[in-house]
């Protein structure tokens, strides 16, 4: 129990640090670039996030679970890195067809991000949460420095790329010094783990597509200015999910190891985060306008009303996120994939239906309604499969 609380604290601290610095980074570039260029960078950043999820291929969650079970670094580390680097090469090659120089430069960050993601997954799995916090702090600080010294979207992407190379090198040195038997090279054949991580890959890709589908849809239908406004809204709401990332991230290794008090802590955490999400939603409802003015300036005042509305999405998000981690810990990640796939279809229909007819307001309503329907989908699949598992256990 003490281990879970300690890990939750460090992960929460790491997420608080990362989200605070991410909000500061967003505020700096929004003010420096303006609504249109900020919208362009948000589109590029969304494509990089989708690319990072594709190249990561679910290995983060797989590494955390399997390394926590083994209690040490195993050969799946070099196998995972080999797969990520190969997929990074393929994704960067695909980005050449966009003929967008800032996008291609930033996509090269996928190579150091592969090393960084493997290293941080190992630190989380082996309970080095204090070092994970340190890397989160450095990551945020590097982004802010890149924002301060940049003058346009191109220079921002270039400085972020350089920062990622420096950060991945430092994370490698930290793991070499703190983890026994750590090593990333020589790379190994990834085929032995490929089938094992397919459900995790499908899940993470689907969830990130759900997360970024709104920005990509607004960019396609409404242009850079609306994309900048919508991105500013979602950045604030995503920043308030830090407690979910911290507590669930700390509980997953404990649940994977089957610790006796972990499920009890899991249920308590759900009640706590539902209450916290309600408070956040009310705060955004009352203080949306001053929050937007403080973070982004007068140019983004149109984002205040949509922000107050989207804050209520935190409540159904809490439900679906806890259910997904519960199912993953039970080894039922394929059920989560089915739920996420259906949710993605729902989101796609909502964005295609509401954005052309209602503009930015339609995008916000689509995001809010989609989050609620996704929670219902997860609840349905969860109780359906848990009931089936209990029936199978009783019959055997």
Image (tube, rainbow, N blue to C red):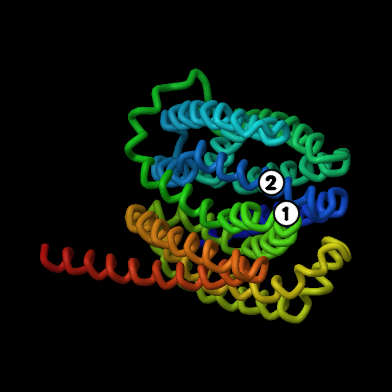
The quadrant of the rendering that contains the C terminus is bottom left
Residue marked by disc 2: 136
Decide if residue 107 is on the left or right side of residue 189. Answer: right
Q: Residue at x 52, y 76 (%)?
A: 271
- Judge whether residue 295 can be spotted in this image: yes
Residue at 79 percent of width and 34 percent of height: 159
The residue carrying pointer 1 sits among few (fewer than 14), some (14 to 19) or many (20 or more) residues within 10 Å by Cα, namely many
Residue at (25, 70) in percent of width and height: 387
| Residue name at image x 77 percent, y 50 percent | 38
Q: Position of residue 327 (x, y in %)?
A: 37, 60
Q: Counting residues from the N terminus, which is met first, the one under dot 2 or under dot 1?
A: 1
In the picture as drawn, the residue positioned furthest to the left comes out as 395
Q: Secondary structure at mark 1?
A: helix
Question: Which residue lies most toward the front here?
Answer: 357
Viewer-side residue, 102 vs 292: 102
Determine contact: label 2, label 1, CB under 8 Å. Answer: yes
Residue on which the image places disc 1: 17
Nearer to us in this view, 182 or 212:
212
* Secondary structure at numbered mark 2: helix
């Amino acid at each position: 129990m003490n281990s879970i609380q300690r890990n939750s604290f460090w992960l929460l601290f790491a997420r608080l640090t990362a989200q605070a610095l991410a909000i500061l980074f967003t505020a700096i570039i929004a003010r420096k670039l303006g609504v249109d260029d900020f919208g362009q960078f948000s589109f590029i950043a969304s494509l990089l996030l989708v690319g990072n999820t594709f190249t990561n291929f679910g290995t983060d969650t797989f590494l955390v679970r399997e390394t926590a079970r083994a209690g040490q670094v195993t050969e799946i580390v070099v196998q995972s890195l080999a797969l990520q680097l190969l997929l990074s090469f393929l994704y960067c090659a695909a980005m050449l067809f966009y003929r967008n120089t800032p996008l291609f430069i930033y996509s090269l960050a996928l190579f150091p991000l592969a090393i960084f993601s493997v290293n941080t997954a190992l630190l989380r799995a082996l309970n080095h949460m204090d070092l994970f916090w340190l890397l989160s702090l450095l990551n945020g600080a590097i982004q802010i420095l890149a924002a301060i010294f940049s003058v346009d979207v191109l220079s921002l992407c270039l400085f972020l790329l350089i920062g990622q190379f420096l950060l991945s090198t430092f994370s490698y040195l930290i793991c070499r010094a703190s983890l026994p038997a750590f090593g990333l090279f020589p790379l190994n054949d990834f085929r032995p783990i490929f089938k094992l991580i397919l459900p995790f890959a499908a899940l993470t890709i689907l969830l990130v597509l759900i997360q970024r589908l709104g920005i990509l849809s607004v960019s396609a239908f409404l242009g850079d200015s609306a994309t900048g406004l919508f991105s500013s809204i979602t950045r604030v709401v995503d920043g308030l999910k830090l407690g979910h990332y911290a507590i669930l991230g700390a509980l997953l290794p404990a649940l994977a190891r089957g610790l006796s008090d972990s499920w009890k802590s899991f249920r308590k955490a759900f009640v706590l985060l539902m209450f916290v999400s309600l408070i956040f939603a009310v705060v955004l409802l009352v203080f949306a306008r001053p929050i937007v003015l403080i973070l982004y300036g007068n140019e983004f005042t149109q984002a205040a009303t949509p922000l107050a509305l989207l804050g209520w999405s935190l409540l159904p998000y809490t439900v679906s996120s806890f259910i997904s981690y519960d199912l993953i810990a039970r080894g039922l990640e394929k059920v989560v994939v089915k739920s996420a796939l259906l949710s993605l279809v729902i989101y796609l229909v909502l964005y295609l239906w509401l954005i052309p007819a209602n503009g930015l307001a339609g995008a916000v309503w689509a995001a809010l309604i989609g989050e609620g329907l996704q929670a219902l989908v997860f609840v349905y699949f969860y109780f359906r499969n848990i009931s089936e598992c209990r029936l199978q256990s009783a019959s055997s």
